[in-house]
């Protein structure tokens, strides 16, 4: 029973933390729901489904991606070197038919829908309640509500008096709950940063008809392009940008801080190759929470983009350990979940005096 209780607490914590991250970053994380009937009957409008963020999907898979500034869940209909062609199961045409939308790049995919066999694992209509909450209040209120629900789930039952010995309690020590919570805090810290990583992509043509249309350039020439980086989170990030490939060069600053809900434009210079064809270029973006001195983050980043995470883990671990000793070291306080063996029969026995 203790193992089941810990597992339940962990699952609830993961769902709550992922919901918080999704609200803050304005993107689905681990769970989401369908906004329309485009995937009916596979996923009905309002159905809540689960996301595997480590998969980019393949033909036949249901993926979650951003299209026209909206998060979309559709199936991969086909794919080529340029990206995915997608289609809702309830739609007649693909999303890309007649050039209506560009093909979906792998970088735009944030995960695939978790399925059992070919059937999505979902909670029917559960998303409708979330949508109703979002209409009645801001995301901040939803976040607070989630925290309150989590607190109730983790503490309920401990305040009631014990009436009969046959009512059992599953006990969870304070240090166990604290360890789980601390782990989730560290995971949240890392995920919130990694989800802000990505790439900025653009294409152009090297052609002898350079200048006749937008995006056409003469072979061997150079041109400049402005790209915009958006911080969709509510808090600031320290960004580092890096050119991928030898044909492009970042002429503006390659590290800067962007406040929450803001954006910044960067300028790059492109050396057009002599070979005439269409080229695609990418700029890599790395984002970090500025909870360490920027000079320290920059130095660690110069060695490896993942090295700042080590410093974050060390810093957060030290803080959480000190906090534990400050508020709970040696405490025997516990959280108790009361379990009724047979609530109905207990009430009947009490009513007849047994």
Image (tube, rainbow, N blue to C red):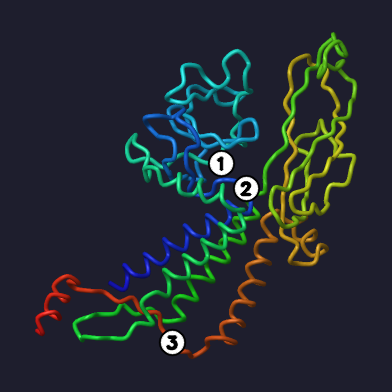
> Which residue is denoted by mark 3 in the rendering?
333
- Count of number-bearing discs: 3
Q: Earlier in the sequence, mark 1 or mark 2?
A: 2
The residue identified by callout 1 is 110
Residue 198's disc is none
Q: CA distance from mark 1 to mark 2?
A: 13 Å
Is the residue under label 3 in contact with that under label 1 (CB below 8 Å)? no
Is 323 located above or below residue 113 in the figure? below
Q: Earlier in the sequence, mark 2 or mark 3?
A: 2
What's the distance in space between the residues labelled 2 and 3, CA to CA? 37 Å
Residue 137 is situated, as x and y percent measured from the top left of the image, at: 59, 53
User: Residue 148: horizontal and vertical position, in percent?
Assistant: 50, 67
Q: Is residue 289 left or right of residue 168?
A: right
Q: Position of residue 181 (x, y in %)?
A: 51, 70
Pointer 3: residues within 10 angstroms few (<14), some, or many (20+)?
few
Looking at this view, name the residue that lies furthest to the front: 351
Q: Which residue is mark 2?
A: 26
């Amino acid at each position: 029973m203790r193992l089941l209780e810990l597992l339940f607490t962990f699952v609830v914590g993961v769902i709550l933390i992922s919901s918080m991250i999704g609200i803050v970053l304005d993107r689905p994380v681990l769970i989401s729901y369908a906004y329309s009937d485009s995937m009916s009957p596979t996923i009905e409008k309002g159905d809540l489904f689960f996301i595997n963020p480590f998969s980019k999907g393949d033909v036949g898979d249901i993926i979650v991606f951003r299209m026209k500034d909206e998060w979309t869940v559709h199936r991969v209909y086909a794919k080529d070197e340029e990206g995915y062609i997608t289609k809702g199961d309830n739609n007649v045409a693909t999303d890309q038919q007649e050039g209506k939308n560009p093909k979906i790049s792998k970088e735009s995919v944030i995960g695939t829908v978790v399925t059992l066999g070919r059937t999505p694992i979902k909670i029917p209509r559960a998303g409708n309640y979330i949508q109703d909450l979002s209409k009645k209040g801001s995301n901040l209120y939803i976040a607070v509500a989630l925290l309150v629900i989590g607190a109730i789930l983790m503490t309920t039952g401990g305040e009631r008096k014990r009436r009969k010995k046959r009512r059992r309690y599953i006990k969870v020590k304070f240090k166990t709950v604290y360890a789980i919570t601390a782990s989730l805090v560290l995971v949240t810290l890392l995920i919130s940063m990694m989800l802000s990583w990505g790439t900025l992509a653009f294409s152009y043509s090297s052609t002898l008809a350079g200048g006749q249309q937008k995006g056409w350039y003469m072979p061997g020439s150079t041109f400049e392009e402005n790209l915009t980086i958006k911080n969709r989170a509510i808090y600031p990030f320290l960004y580092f940008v890096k050119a991928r490939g030898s044909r492009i060069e970042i002429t503006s600053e390659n590290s800067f801080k962007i406040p929450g809900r803001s954006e910044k434009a960067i300028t790059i210079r492109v050396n057009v190759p002599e070979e005439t064809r269409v080229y695609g270029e990418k700029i890599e973006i790395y984002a970090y929470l500025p909870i360490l001195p920027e000079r320290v983050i920059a130095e660690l980043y110069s060695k490896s983009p993942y090295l700042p995470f080590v410093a974050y883990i060390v810093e957060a671990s030290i803080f959480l350990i000190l906090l534990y000793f400050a508020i709970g070291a040696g405490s025997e306080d516990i959280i108790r979940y009361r379990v009724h063996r047979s609530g109905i029969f207990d009430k009947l026995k009490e009513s007849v005096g047994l």
